[in-house]
Image (cartoon, rainbow, N blue to C red):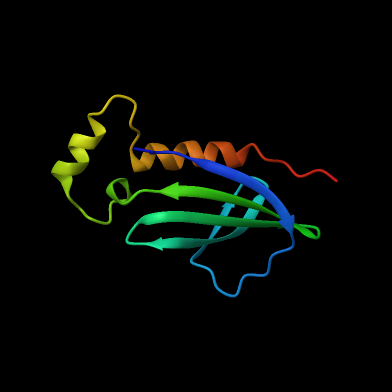
Amino acid sequence: LVDFNLSFEIVPKVNLSFKDGEYNKGALKGEWVLEGAEGCGTSNYYFPYGNKTLVVKRDNIQTLSGIRNNAEEMKNILLIPGVISREQNQIIFDQILFTFKFTK
């Protein structure tokens, strides 16, 4: 069970043809796209700066996404030592991205 996983990459400037949403936290302002289905897959966040883009990939797992609304299953999973909830995941994600600062 992977309840939290991020990867970071700097790539040449990216122009998205579609987006699932926007994300703004601290110095980061960008868009995100879900690659997956039914709450499972990867959310890719794109933060442009200059002629480059910071890409943050965030793993999602269906069971903790809330999409299935199976309270009993969710309760049992959250009883596993060390597993974090969707809400805790979001807090950690926001705290990490809030610390980013672009310098020239």
Query: Which of 19/41 is in front?
Result: 41
Image quadrant assignment for residue 102: top right
Identify the residue at the far bottom of this view. 17
Query: Which of 84/95 is in front?
Result: 84
Identify the residue at the far top of this view. 81
- Point out the image quarter for the N terminus: top left
* Looking at the image, residue 46 lies above or below residue 72: below
Q: Is residue 63 left or right of residue 98?
A: left
Q: Position of residue 22 (x, y in %)?
A: 54, 61
Q: What residue is shown at x 32% (from left), y 61% (from top)?
A: 38
Q: What residue is shown at x 54% (from left), y 36% (from top)?
A: 95
Q: Is residue 69 left or right of residue 43?
A: left
Identify the residue at the far front of this view. 1
Q: Position of residue 57 (x, y in %)?
A: 54, 50
Q: Is residue 13 left or right of residue 71?
A: right
Query: Which of 104/80 is in front?
Result: 80
* Looking at the image, residue 6 lies above or below residue 33: above
Identify the residue at the far right of this view. 104
Image quadrant assignment for residue 73: top left
Q: What residue is shown at x 22% (from left), y 55% (from top)?
A: 68
Q: Position of residue 62 (x, y in %)?
A: 31, 52
Image quadrant assignment for residue 87: top left
Number of marks: 0
Q: Position of residue 17 (x, y in %)?
A: 60, 75
Q: What residue is shown at x 45% (from left), y 47% (from top)?
A: 59
